[in-house]
Image: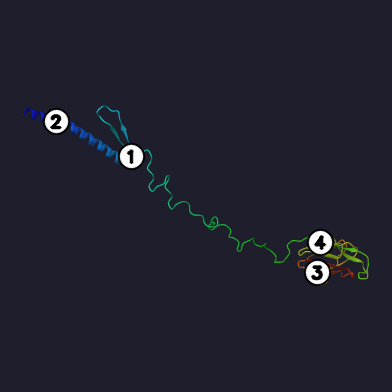
Amino acid sequence: MKVSLKRRLNLFPKLRRRLSSVKWILLLVTTAMFFLSASSSGCSFNIAFGGPPGTGPSVVGPQPSQSALPPVGGGSGSPPAVGGGSPPAVAGGSPPAVGGGSPPAVGGGSPPPSGGKKGSPVGGKKVMVTIQKGTPTATDPSGFVFVDSVTKTNVTNINKGDTVIWTNNTKVNHTVTDDKGSFDSGDFAPGSKPFMHTFTTAGTVTYNCQDHPGQVGTIKVT
């Protein structure tokens, strides 16, 4: 009877020790599960050891991870602008300004200069021809001649748009008359204002002095 009672009384310390072991096992299992659950959610824990004896490890609450969570949808930095980046450039350079600027020339190239019909001269040089006293000949009994300042003959070579200026260097009157009548100076006296004419058509023009038969000249226009 005494032995049986003593065995029963000894069961309580053993049971307490077993319960204490079970309690620690459950605590360790619970802690491990807690750590696993927390690590999967992106949190870190600070475990402080070295507390008072018998108190066990102290868990200092769940701490947020040191690194920031990545933005939703992947990538880093600021979220992309709505619509995605800058608008694509219009083909062929910058787009033309709306409602402004001069319209492009139709057909390309610079527009032709205004004024004058096609083929009409613009500008031109001046060529001097003088009337001088020469030697009489059978064909020019008066001896007066037209002398070009360049060729030194009665032939003058010019381009379309050039102007020929006649000057009387003699002591008598003369005329400069086109054989076909397109121009005529009339009589102009020595020292009077020179006579001039601009040639706009290519070809050969012959002229004469109405006062002196045989006094002739030629204008070649190219």
Q: Quadrant of residue 39?
A: top left
Q: In which quarter of the image is residue 171?
A: bottom right
Which amino acid type is shown beneath numbered disc 1?
Cys
Which class describes the residues within 10 Å of circle 3: few (<14), some (14-19), or many (20+)? few
Mark sitting earlier along the chain (1/4): 1
Return the residue nearer the eye: 80 or 159.
80
> Where residue 44 sits in the image (x, y, percent)?
33, 37
Which amino acid type is shown beneath numbered disc 3?
Thr
Q: Do the residues labelled 1 and 2 touch (CB within 8 Å)?
A: no
Which class describes the residues within 10 Å of circle 2: few (<14), some (14-19), or many (20+)? few
Q: Which of marks 1 and 2 is in front?
A: 2
Mark sitting earlier along the chain (3/1): 1
- Residue lying at the far left of the rendered structure: 1
Quadrant housing the N terminus? top left
In this picture, is 69 found above or below 14?
A: below
CA–CA distance in space, label 1 to label 4:
104 Å
Residue at the disc numbered 3: 204
CA–CA distance in space, label 3 to label 1:
108 Å
| Disc on res. 12 | 2
Q: Is mark 2 on a helix, strand or loop?
A: helix
Residue at the disc numbered 4: 127
